[in-house]
Amino acid sequence: TTPMLAINDLNVTYPGQRGLFVKPEGFCAVDGVSLSVAPGQTFGLVGESGSGKSTVARAVLQLAPVTSGQIILNGKDVSSPKGEALKSFRREVQAVFQDPTSALNPSMTIGDAIAQVLKKHHLATGTAHEQRQEAARLLDLVQLPSAIAGRLPSELSGGQRQRIAIARALAVQPKVILCDEPTSALDVSVAGQIVNLFRDLQAETGVTYLFISHDLGTVRHISQRIGVMLQGRLVEEGPTEQVFANPQHPYTKMLVASTPVADPERQRLRADVRRNYGSAQLAPRGSEGCPFRTRCPEVMDICHSKLPEVEKITDGGQGRCHLLKQERS
Ligand code: SF4
Ligand code: MG
């Protein structure tokens, strides 16, 4: 089947300038990232802050300086839509961010905030009564009582505000929702409820997600595929269960060993794995070699001088590590 969203060899470089912090050659935030998401499925993009995962989402939203590569939505190249194509793109691809508060006008009721989205996309047809009914339907979809429509954002909890942000994204019946750390600001139990809500909504509406998190455990329960980013590059990508059962890249092995498990014996084995990794900083960006070589228990000579290229791994996955090439040859 045609992927709902495909990103092909994406490069994002912020322009350089002469100065203390930004080098004249610019800052390469995303380097050669390729991934695709099947319709109605979720791709989980994981990495620490600054690894480039939000920039991938911003590039899809046309908010980052894409220097090369393509963004394909449902088979159509949407790398730089203009005019009508941009308008329909803005409706088809929605986003939910970490902090829902910034998107909500503090003096506008929740019902009006939902109506505002419908009007913006020229979907607010019918009488005021019918529009209120649509708002109630959307609130019900995100499992909130319709009485919330009369409240102000300040009267809601963080979890409720995030549900409103999701309702506003769903209001325009998008094909794709980019979820950028949507649960990171919430308490653990509320975060779990929101992840479950995302899952329920996908089952109900068939929407496709790119789900970004710094936490591998969070994306496990919602994603069919997972990608791990490090310094702007995808270092491992594959089906979720395969990545968890048999991580190939040493960085992924470390992340998997850091996700908690209930079984004490497995917990002990994971602690053993974690002990093999140093606590050193990553090698500086732009230096030669693999950025993980400073912490990698499997480091080889070549890792100091040569950046690993993208290699295919089993079941359609990919990775960037010199070990992957050795295993194939
Ligand atoms: Fe480790 Fe080398 Fe693979 Fe980098 S390329 S993760 S240093 S084995
Ligand atoms: Mg981010």
Image (spheres, rainbow, N blue to C red):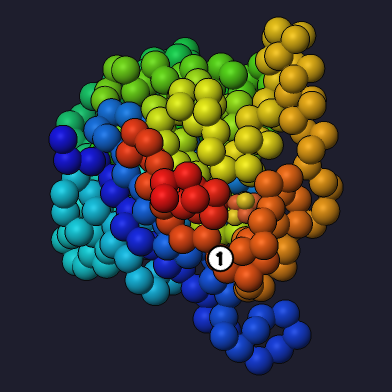
Q: Considering depth in this image, is 207 or 302 the residue closer to the camera?
A: 302
In the image, residue 187 lies at what x, y percent? 70, 24
User: Which residue in the structure is indicated by mark 1?
Assistant: 307
Name the foreground residue: 278 vs 134.
Answer: 278
Of residue 131 and residue 256, the one placed in the foreground of this image is 256
Instruction: Work out whether residue 181 or residue 233 is closer to the camera in this orientation and state it.
Output: 233
User: Residue at point 72% right, 80% down?
Assistant: 21
Left or right: residue 170 compared with residue 183? left
Residue located 31% across and 57% down the image: 8
Element type at mark 1? loop
Look at the picture and state if 246 lies above or below 73: above
Residue 298: tell me if it is visible.
yes
**Left or right, 269 with reference to 101:** right
Q: Quadrant of the N terminus?
A: top left
Q: Residue at x 83, y 53 (%)?
A: 280
Circle 1: residue type:
Leu
Q: Name the spot of residue 323 as percent of width and height, x first.
A: 55, 49
Query: Looking at the image, which residue is at 70% across and 20% down?
Result: 260
Question: Looking at the rendering, which quadrant does residue 169 occupy?
Answer: top left
Q: Residue furthest front?
A: 329
- Label 1: how many residues lie within 10 Å, few (<14), some (14-19) or many (20+)? some
